[in-house]
């Protein structure tokens, strides 16, 4: 059953005081938009899962699985002096995927009843039989142990227990204080987002896995307008699998003046010349090049061409495995679905594969990919590394980037340096903080990135902000141009909640923990 509230409010903070807000929001949420009541008599989801598995076996499938899921998502967005968006919704249903004579079939429904389990299982098999008519090669899966387990994200504060009024007051206050910093700050915003995923996975191989995943994030920003130009600056509590304790409202207030001052400096800053330069990239920026030029190219379904419609295939084809210099020897990229707080951290993927960690690039060499059970079999592996994920009960699992991070420089290594040391040894270059625009070609080779804030480095010193800088490179040229990597103490968990893939598009989330790096001889321009 789909149940939820969808609110679109425009509340001017100078019209409604906080006491009034405390009356309005609970009324709108609890009375004005009542939740649809669940049936009084329901079948336990474990019983439904067992019914599905039994029926899949009776229908003659060599493999089958069911995911029974409930997703709650809450998002708040304040802009200027108004709360522009407030949504708190819940979506619940199940999806059944079967393998019949080497062909996939999938069907889903929002009705969690025994009768609907029977119907959807039958429909999934009929779809698999239809797919079988055009099959070229049968699908084969690597084995996976059967697990009976439960996993829950460890949190200190449940974000859904925090009153909406408290969250709203924080956002409106932050936004209004940003606007009050200077007359040329013309726009301001602040936002919060929270998710709770409840999933039960069962398979014909004997797994029965329950998971509850919490996710939290937020941020703020503002725009300065002067001399016919507008420039923005932002601050983010990078999305992580944590509770409300991750938000830390005091950090919003501690960064208010800095964010506004940098937006003002940026709008008055000069533009950069075209040419080549040394770049020092902070983790707040570097996560995005990692995501686009290392994460997506090593998704094995993309390598095999299963995924091509959305953002293309990959240059990192399988003949390059274990013999291709992807990056400089000091560069190591490790996937880790177990790291504390990682946006893609969980107990098991959506094929029941236990979370693990592994190197994708080791000492600069491409040594592995991101796999599900099907692509791992085609690669000749004995097991999947657990990268299957579906963003909804009505979505088919596919290979998704896990937490994929750049390891810090080795202690005492000749290419290990702190951020301050990188700046000090840069004669002519730029320091980039935060993400902005980007583009990348259809095989993930040729890319272009911009930053949220950029400072000129001259003779080892920061020499003021510049604006509208973008840099361009080829993936392997860029990563082989790394001349320094930051320390473990400077490594930060940065990432995204909005990675799109597939048609129809699915949205996933992942963390790309990384330290700052220095790269040389990179083409820059406006």
Image: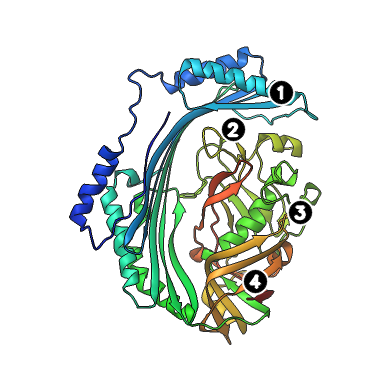
486 sits to left or right of 38: right
Residue at (34, 30) in percent of width and height: 36
Q: Mark 3 and mark 4: span between their CA atoms?
A: 21 Å
Residue at (56, 81) in percent of width and height: 456
Q: Quadrant of the N terminus?
A: top left
Tell me the crowding category of disc 2: few under 14, some 14 to 19, or many 20 or more residues within 10 angstroms, Cα based. many
Q: Quadrant of the C terminus?
A: bottom right
Tell me the crowding category of disc 3: few under 14, some 14 to 19, or many 20 or more residues within 10 angstroms, Cα based. some
Q: Mark 1 and mark 3: span between their CA atoms?
A: 32 Å
Residue 350 percent across, percent down from the top left: 56, 35
Q: Which mark is residue 471?
A: 4
Is the residue 392 above or below the residue 524 in the image?
A: above
Element on which disc 2 rests: loop
Residue 490 percent across, percent down from the top left: 50, 66
Q: Nearer the viewer, mark 1 or mark 3?
A: 1
Query: CB under 8 Å between callouts 1 and 3?
Result: no
**Residue designated by label 1:** 130
Q: Mark 4 and mark 2: span between their CA atoms?
A: 39 Å
**Residue designated by label 3:** 315
| Sequence-wise first label, 1 or 4 | 1
Is the residue 478 above or below the residue 154 in the image?
A: below
- Residue 46 in which image quadrant: top left
| Sequence-wise first label, 1 or 3 | 1
State the residue lying farthest toward the top.
Answer: 58
């Amino acid at each position: 059953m789909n149940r939820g509230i969808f609110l679109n409010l425009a509340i001017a903070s100078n019209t409604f005081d906080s006491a009034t807000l405390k009356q309005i929001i609970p009324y709108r949420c609890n009375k004005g938009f009542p939740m649809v009541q669940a049936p009084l008599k329901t079948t336990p989801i474990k019983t439904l899962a067992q019914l599905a598995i039994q029926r899949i076996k009776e229908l003659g499938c060599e493999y089958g699985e069911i995911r029974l899921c409930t997703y709650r998502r809450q998002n708040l967005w304040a802009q200027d002096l108004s709360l522009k968006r407030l949504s708190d919704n819940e979506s619940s249903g199940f999806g059944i995927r079967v393998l019949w004579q080497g062909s996939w079939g999938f069907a889903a429904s929002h009705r969690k009843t025994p009768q609907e389990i029977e119907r959807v299982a039958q429909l999934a098999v009929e779809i698999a039989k239809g797919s079988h008519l055009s099959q070229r090669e049968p699908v084969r899966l690597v084995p996976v142990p059967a697990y009976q387990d439960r996993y829950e994200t460890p949190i200190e504060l449940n974000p859904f227990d925090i009153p909406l009024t408290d969250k709203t007051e924080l956002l409106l206050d932050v936004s209004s204080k940003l606007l009050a910093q200077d007359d040329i700050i013309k726009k301001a915003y602040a936002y919060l987002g929270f998710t709770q995923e409840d999933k039960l996975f069962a398979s014909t191989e004997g797994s029965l896995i329950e998971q509850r995943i919490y996710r939290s994030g937020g941020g703020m920003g503002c725009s300065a307008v002067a001399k016919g130009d507008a420039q923005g600056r932002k601050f983010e509590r990078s999305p992580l699998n944590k509770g409300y304790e991750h938000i830390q409202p005091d950090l919003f207030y501690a960064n208010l003046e800095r964010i506004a001052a940098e937006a003002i400096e940026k709008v008055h800053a000069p533009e950069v010349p075209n040419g080549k330069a040394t770049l020092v990239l902070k983790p707040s920026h570097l996560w995005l090049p990692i995501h686009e030029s290392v994460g997506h190219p090593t998704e094995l379904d993309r390598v095999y061409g299963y995924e091509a419609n959305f953002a293309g295939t990959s240059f990192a084809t399988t003949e390059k495995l274990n013999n291709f210099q992807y990056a400089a020897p000091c560069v190591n990229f490790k996937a880790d679905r177990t790291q504390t707080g990682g946006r893609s951290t969980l107990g098991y993927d959506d094929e029941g594969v236990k979370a693990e960690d592994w190197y994708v690039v080791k000492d600069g060499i491409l040594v592995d990919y991101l796999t599900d059970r099907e692509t791992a079999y085609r690669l000749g592996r004995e097991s999947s590394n657990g990268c299957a994920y579906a963003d909804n009960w009505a979505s088919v699992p596919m290979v998704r980037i896990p937490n994929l991070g750049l390891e810090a420089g080795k202690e005492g290594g000749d290419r290990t340096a702190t951020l301050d040391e990188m700046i000090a040894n840069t004669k002519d270059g730029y320091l980039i903080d935060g993400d902005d625009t980007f583009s990348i070609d259809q095989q993930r080779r040729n890319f272009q990135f911009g930053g949220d804030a950029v400072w000129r480095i001259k003779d080892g010193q920061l020499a003021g902000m510049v604006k509208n800088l973008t840099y361009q490179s080829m993936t392997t040229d860029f990563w082989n141009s790394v001349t320094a990597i930051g320390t473990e103490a400077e490594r930060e968990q940065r990432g995204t909640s909005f990675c799109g893939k597939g048609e129809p598009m699915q949205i996933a989330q992942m963390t790309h923990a990384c330290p700052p790096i220095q790269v040389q001889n990179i083409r820059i321009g406006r």
